[in-house]
């Protein structure tokens, strides 16, 4: 997950799902094979499940800390794509630039 909100009106997030969850979604026909890098998951059931988890977490946070909008990517962040360091730290600037279109759409 990459939280976005610096210099913006509210906090949003770019989520990734584990490989095992993505395989289940793919085998259930909910994901298109060979999904492009910046394509988000649009399956309503999956988004509702993620939304329910976000709502649960948001209950414990002040309103300015709460995640207001989110997208779920069709793949995990990876070292090979340059989004993670070899020690598995997220490269926020790479994530924000690579998924700029999706992030901007949450604020548009």
Image (cartoon, rainbow, N blue to C red):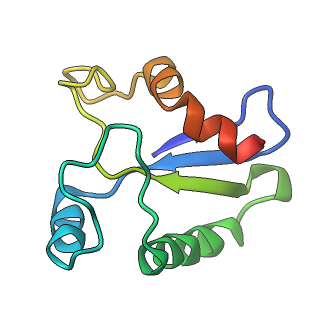
- Percent x, y for residue 64? 83, 50
Q: Residue at x 50, y 18 (%)?
A: 93
Frontmost residue, 90 versus 27: 27
Tell me if I can see residue 4 in this picture.
no
Q: Residue at x 58, y 47 (%)?
A: 13
- Percent x, y for residue 106? 69, 46
The C terminus sits in image quarter: top right
In this rendering, the answer to whether 52 lies above or below 19 is: below
Relative to residue 62, is residue 101 drawn left or right? left
- Percent x, y for residue 17? 32, 57
Tell me if I can see residue 49 in this picture.
yes
In this rendering, the answer to whether 25 lies above or below 41 is: below
In this rendering, the answer to whether 48 lies above or below 34 is: below
Q: Residue at x 57, y 72 (%)?
A: 51
- Percent x, y for residue 11? 72, 45
* Number of marks in the rendered image: 0
Q: Quadrant of residue 30?
A: bottom left
Frontmost residue, 104 versus 18: 104
Q: Quadrant of residue 22?
A: bottom left
């Amino acid at each position: 997950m990459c939280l976005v909100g610096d210099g913006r009106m509210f906090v949003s997030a770019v989520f990734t799902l584990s490989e095992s969850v993505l395989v289940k979604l793919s085998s259930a026909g909910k994901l298109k094979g060979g999904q492009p890098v910046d394509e988000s998951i649009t399956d309503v059931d999956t988004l509702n499940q993620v939304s329910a988890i976000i709502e649960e977490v948001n209950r414990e946070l002040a309103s300015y800390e709460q995640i207001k909008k989110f997208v779920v990517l069709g793949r995990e962040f990876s070292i090979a794509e340059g989004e993670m360091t070899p020690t598995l730290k997220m490269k926020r600037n790479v994530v924000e630039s690579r998924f700029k279109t999706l992030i901007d759409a949450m604020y548009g």
